[in-house]
């Protein structure tokens, strides 16, 4: 009985101290870890399919710009690992900036056509947005393959891609 209450008190104390340290953590200079992946868009559709391939050795850049006057507040680059993943560490809080990860360079000559300029992955690097934790995942970014793989037609058909595309085209021609 006595032992059980000691354990209960200890457990309670641990809970309080860990919530206190979380409270202090928020006041310290922040550090964020941004993770994402670079793939080869083997079907040239600007989204991932099951035929997409990871690209290792691709270069991505992270850029944060002051939302008010557009000047750069943070810039860095990283290279993807053997699985096409990158990890960028950033110190500080960038609540006043717009931060994006964008493609820079692909090591694959058959797959080095960056997807549209507007395709960037927005990351939010502030503790003030209600997202807790230091890890931020960026949407995956793809380079387009010069020539689509022969299997793409079937994979895209399975995904319903052509139906949606026709609907969009019909809407565009008969508004
Ligand atoms: C962003 O630019 C505005 C206008 O010049 C300035 O007041 C503000 O301090 C800048 N913010 C950062 C984080 O540099
Ligand atoms: C934007 O604001 C920052 C902080 O006030 C300043 O250092 C920087 O020079 C400004 N950039 C431009 C392009 O006005």
Image: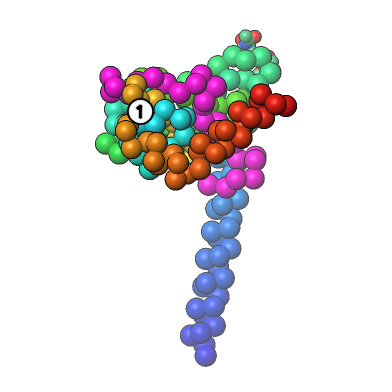
Which quadrant is home to the C terminus?
A: top right
Expressed as whole percent of the image width and height from the top left, the position of residue 81 reads 30, 34
Q: Quadrant of residue 51?
A: top left
Q: Nearer the viewer, residue 63 or 147?
A: 147
Expressed as whole percent of the image width and height from the top left, the position of residue 83 reads 30, 39
Against 169, residue 72 (above or below) is above
Identify the residue shown where x is 55% and y is 39%. Answer: 163
Expressed as whole percent of the image width and height from the top left, the position of residue 82 reads 27, 36
**Whether residue 72 can be seen here:** yes
Identify the residue shown where x is 51% and y is 30%. Answer: 121
Stretch in magenta? 108-133
Residue at the far right in the pictured view: 175
Identify the residue shown where x is 57% and y is 47%. Answer: 132
Residue 79 in the figure: left or right of residue 26: left
Tell me, yes or no, whether the highlighted magenta stretch contains residue 111: yes
Q: Which residue is mark 1?
A: 148
Most common secondary structure along the magenta stretch: loop
Badge 1 residue CB within 8 Å of ligand 2 = no
Residue 53 in the figure: left or right of residue 126: left
Q: Nearer the viewer, residue 95 or 5?
A: 95
Q: Nearer the viewer, residue 53 or 147?
A: 147
């Amino acid at each position: 009985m006595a032992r059980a209450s000691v354990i209960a008190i200890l457990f309670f104390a641990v809970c309080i101290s860990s919530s206190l340290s979380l409270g202090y953590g928020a006041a310290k200079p922040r550090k964020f870890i941004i993770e994402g992946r670079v793939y080869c868009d083997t079907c040239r559709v600007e989204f991932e399919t099951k035929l997409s391939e990871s690209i290792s050795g691709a270069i991505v850049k992270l850029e944060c710009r002051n939302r008010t006057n557009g000047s750069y507040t943070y810039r860095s680059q990283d290279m993807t690992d053997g699985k096409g993943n990158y990890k960028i560490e950033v110190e500080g809080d960038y609540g006043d900036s717009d931060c994006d990860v964008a493609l820079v360079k692909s090591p694959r000559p058959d797959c080095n056509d960056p997807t549209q300029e507007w395709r960037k992955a927005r990351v939010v690097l502030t503790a003030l947005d209600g997202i807790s934790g230091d890890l931020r995942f960026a949407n995956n970014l793809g380079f387009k393959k010069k020539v689509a793989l022969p299997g793409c037609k079937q994979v895209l058909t399975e995904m319903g891609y052509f139906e949606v595309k026709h609907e969009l085209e019909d809407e565009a021609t008969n508004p």
